[in-house]
Amino acid sequence: MRKTLTFIGNGSMATAMASKLKEHYLIEVVGRNLANLDTFEAAVDTDVEKHLLGGFDITGKTVLLCVKPGNIAEVGEKLAGTAEALYSVLAGTTLDTLKRHIQARGCVRTMPNLAASVGKSMTTLTGDRHLEAEAVALFGAIGMSLWVGSEKELDIATALAGSGPAYLALIAEALTDGAVKQGLRRDDAMTLMRGLFAGFGELIQTQHPALLKDGVMSPGGTTAAGYAALEKAGVRHGCIDAIAAAFARTKLS
């Protein structure tokens, strides 16, 4: 018999995760509005057990907390019992805060990313060590998962893998715009960009970025000219500063 996962919250991340996890688990969802829960069920495209939040008993359940960070106190007040395991996707919300508001025998902070909806998330995890194996397996169902040893490391990982899709989207859009500026049709530029990212995604799994760069850059060639322009524009430092700014923001959440 398949295990049941209980989603508290029915937003975009919960929907993305449930859409993939339904292949391995039964899904139930808890929220404030039955119409929104119906929308969640339709988006996940499987039978979902639906419950309203007020007084819902989480005793013995494996709970995935997917609400807005600012709502944790309100949500915690409306839950009863003690969960077997609590997995939170709330950015910047510490284990101490989670445990203060929601009772659970074990607690894990997680940070999946947008690619969860296509089973390609890069999820970082940390928390009570007795849940490590279960956590890695659970979030491995929606992509790659990595357990780290501290909340500081998870917050840094959030800045990289959690926010990373937005950074890569900016680069993808900018490169496409550059090709259009030089005279390429927009549709063709988009096709080339998508092919570029698909191929690069495979290559980067087994090769160091510096070696990939060196393999493409011939002396005095087109790649060397373009690479020099990126360095002149400060792209490398911009990326490093983006991680620093995002990490700093996690500490203010």
Image (cartoon, rainbow, N blue to C red):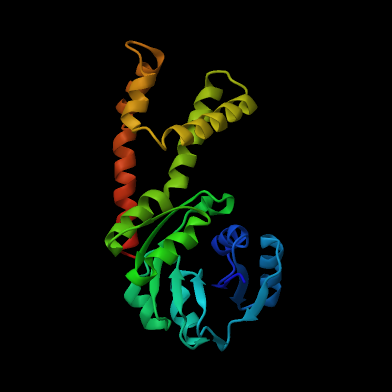
Name of the residue lying farthest toward the front: 1
Disc tally is 0
**Displayed quadrant of residue 155:** bottom left
For the C terminus, the quadrant is: bottom left
Decide if residue 229 is in sight here.
no
Residue 63 x/y as whole percent: 50, 74
Q: Residue 140 versus residue 13: which sits nearer the camera?
A: 140
Q: Is residue 23 left or right of residue 213?
A: right
Asked if 221 appears above or below 33 in the picture, the reply is above
- At horizontal 40% and vertical 50% (from top left) the residue drawn is 161
Asked if 112 appears above or below 26 in the picture, the reply is above
Q: Is residue 56 left or right of residue 43?
A: left
Name of the residue lying farthest toward the top: 220
Q: Residue 142 versus residue 79: which sits nearer the camera?
A: 142
- At horizontal 39% and vertical 20% (from top left) the residue drawn is 216
Residue 203 x/y as whole percent: 44, 32
Asked if 246 appears above or below 151 in the picture, the reply is above
- At horizontal 48% and vertical 29% (from top left) the residue drawn is 175
Asked if 63 appears above or below 19 in the picture, the reply is below
For the N terminus, the quadrant is: bottom right
- At horizontal 45% and vertical 74% (from top left) the residue drawn is 86
Residue 250 x/y as whole percent: 34, 61
Decide if residue 29 is in sight here.
yes
Residue 57 x/y as whole percent: 54, 86
**Displayed quadrant of residue 52:** bottom right
